[in-house]
Amino acid sequence: MDQFIQAAIIGVSLGAQYALLALGFTLIFGILGVVNFSHGGFYMLGGYVAYSCVAFLGLPYPLAVLVAVVATGALGWVFELFLLERLVDDHLATLMLTLGLYLVVSTGLLTVFGPLSMEFAFPVTGALHMGPIYVPRENLIVLVVCLAAIAALWLVLFRTDLGRGLRALADDRAVAMAQGLRPKLLFPLAFAIATGLAGLTGALVTPILSLSPNVGDPVLATSFLTVILGGLGSLEGAALAAFVVGIVEAFSSVYFGGSIGALVLFVLVLLLLVFRPTGLMGRPVRGA
Amino acid sequence: MTELRVESLAKRFGGLRVFQDINFTLPEGGLLGVIGPNGAGKTTLINVISGRQMASAGKVVLGGRDITNQPAHAVSRLGLARSFQQTNTFKSVSVGENIARAIRFGGRGAPVGLNRMMDAFGLTPRLAEISDKLPYGLQKMLGLVMAFASTPKIVLLDEPAAGLERTERQSVDTFVDIVRKAGTSVLLVEHDMDLIRRMCPRILVLDAGVLLADGPPAEVLARPDVIAAYLGETEEAH
Amino acid sequence: MRIKLLGWTEIVALLLLSCGFIVPMFTRSVLVYSVLNQAFVGVIAAESVWIMLRMNLLSFATPAFMAIGGYTVAIAGQYDITDAFLMTAAAFLVPALVAVPLGALVLRLRGTYFVLVTFVLSQIMQLLIFETPGLTGGSNGISGVAPVTLFGAEMGTNRLVLEYACGLAMGATLITGVLTRYFRQHFAAIEENEILAESLGLVVWRYKALGFVVAAGVAGLAGYSLVNMLLTAHPSSFDSATAVDFIAYTIIGGRLSILGPVLGTGALVYATNLFGTHGQYAQGLYGVLILVVVLAARGGIVGTIAALWRRVS
């Protein structure tokens, strides 16, 4: 039972991280129709920016996280505005552009920081003990920040004019444009929000896991897994699926070990893609 | 014996009705006009008959064979071709290559009258030109020629005159003449009332997804409900 | 209408590849052999990507089918089956057969969804290798694969291995060339306007399925060539991330003709080796080149050369 609760806690905390990544990923797909292969790159970049701020500038960690969010958001904004925007309706071209950016970012990080893992430790250590169950404080903080970020994103998307505009663009671009919404302004902004979220996740999580120039690939794979499971473009679906993926991963690693959990998830996703591309939550498919 | 029979055909998108209870027969070698205001469901009707979209209910029967919800290529292989409202060609290749592909994909060889049609439209001297570089009207005519080049028994035309200059619209008459001489029957969906009046011995009026009238144009177009639904609006527009 | 089985681009590609038989007459450099070997494997894999790209379908599944081809040969080797012809046929046919039911499933998807499903396929294959140690050796792979034999003679020397890799690359180019040349109209029509092609009677799924199956077989040959070069079948050889390399070779080389994957692979494998032991930095070069090609030179290397040539003449 203790093991069970322990696994559940790990699962939920993984789920919150995945939710941040997946929400950004699905936001970009829903609004721009772009599959962002550079998502893992922004995650890594967030980690390295936060690390640099702490290690070289001596900034306190929370401030470093904030800088990471701004930096990744800004890069995302510039990338969308100047490169992606030109070809935004050509799905193959945008996919290749984000792939190219990912290769450039990861190689850039490799060049500057070298191939080895950074010594980037979370500033808070220790664990909370509740009887036989213990929860590392760092995980708890990450969980709280992730949930707060998800809540903030929710507020922005569902309670502000900006959010209404973004969701309208995701629903039907032609109608939204006819109503006077301007994709030229909103597309870069949506991309920046999404990449900022990836940067935030990186800045929060890499001190706990690891920070090296190859941690982006699994992040991309997990983001794929989650958003397909939740239905491409669906925000609610992505958030729900993130917790499913996190919990399945935690339980399968505790009870089965190895990669069987991931295998099951991927096969499930393959079947979903083929037979129900709208995902678990269901939502009209675009471009298929 | 290749007649097209449509029985109680209906199409819904979710809860939204596009059309329902459509019944008509297009006899072999016949010519049937379909008119109706924008949004009456004309293009969707063509899409459903040609297998591009699924029918919600009803049947499409081609030459005694039920082709309802067959995939588009299968319907085309059975001899039912269609044109598109927007220009629709293989833009990056030449006019000749476009026509060659239509003949090859159709798998029935080139139809009688194809050369005469290309001459009539002025496409013969432009065979080597990239189709995207043609003027709009010619691109549209090329789309028609391609539908015919697959040697169909029936061809569905989706507003062939839309976007053409008045002087270019005569080409649609020429097209229908040559197609019918080859023994092919024609379903002509059109907005241009002059064209419909001078060409079609019989027309259907579609309004808000239901069949409002079926008969000779002179008779049908004089009906008050048809005038109310449709004519008032478009006579002014044209 | 006369349909050609091979055009001049295919013939030039075959001539370029035949350098694998000529170079050994002049040098015995291990480095040159190694670079050429890598290039031959890469060319085959890139051609597999290119076949699908002819129909505007971008596939990340190449490493998965390479793994099936590679492991088929490695497992057969454990049963002392080493005949070159038999192995070549098996490396092509086994992945191609696997692709038949898979294709029926995934070819219902278009565009972005096809990309995603092939990405997922690659991940699944990777995980399957780790989860089936009895068959594939799991994370250890299968080492000590016996060299192939041609008419009973073992092809063990560096030179013979290179020449065999060259032969495989030429064979794959021949298969790819004949397929894409014979069905050029069909593939081009699907690439440009699938809906129109279908309305004219083209049975689109048939050509997509054919392309998918042959692309899988060609990828299997790449996996075979790789295993034959390393004498090892290891999961890292078929890492799903390598799909990006093959896509880069194809896009940067140019997607308009078969010379694209051939020249793109040659140029990028050569460039990668210029980085020496820091091969991982080459990824950055790929990234920059992909951005340049997509934004400024859609035809890639081959398209750019062709455009320059037209301007000169």
Image: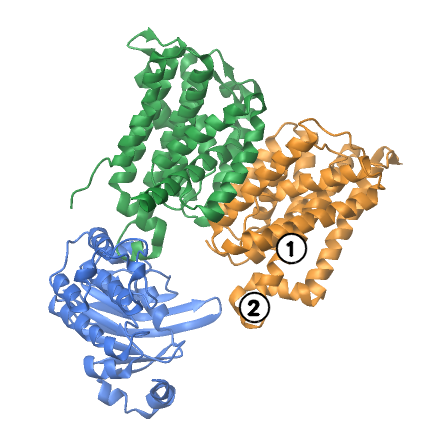
Chain colours: A orange, B blue, C green
Q: Are the residues under marks 1 and 2 on the same chain?
A: yes
On the image, the x and y values in percent for residue A50 come to 76, 40
The residue to which callout 2 is attached is A176
Query: Residue, x 22% and y 75% (percent of image)?
Result: B32
Compared with B71, A215 (above or below) is above
Q: Is residue C275 above or below residue A31?
A: above
Q: Residues within 10 Å of mark 2 (few under 14, many from 20)?
A: some
**Closer to viewer: mark 1 or mark 2:** 2
Q: Is residue A134 left or right of residue B184?
A: right
Q: Quadrant of residue C97?
A: top left
Of residues C287 and B211, the one nearer the viewer is: C287
**Can you say whether A173 is above or below B192 in the image?**
above
Disc 1: which chain? Answer: A
Q: Quadrant of residue C200?
A: bottom left
Q: Is residue A268 at all visible to an observer of this figure? A: yes
Q: Position of residue C270 (x, y in %)?
A: 46, 26
Residue named by callout 1: A236
| Helix, strand or loop under label 1 | helix
Residue in the image at 29% along x and 30% along y: C174
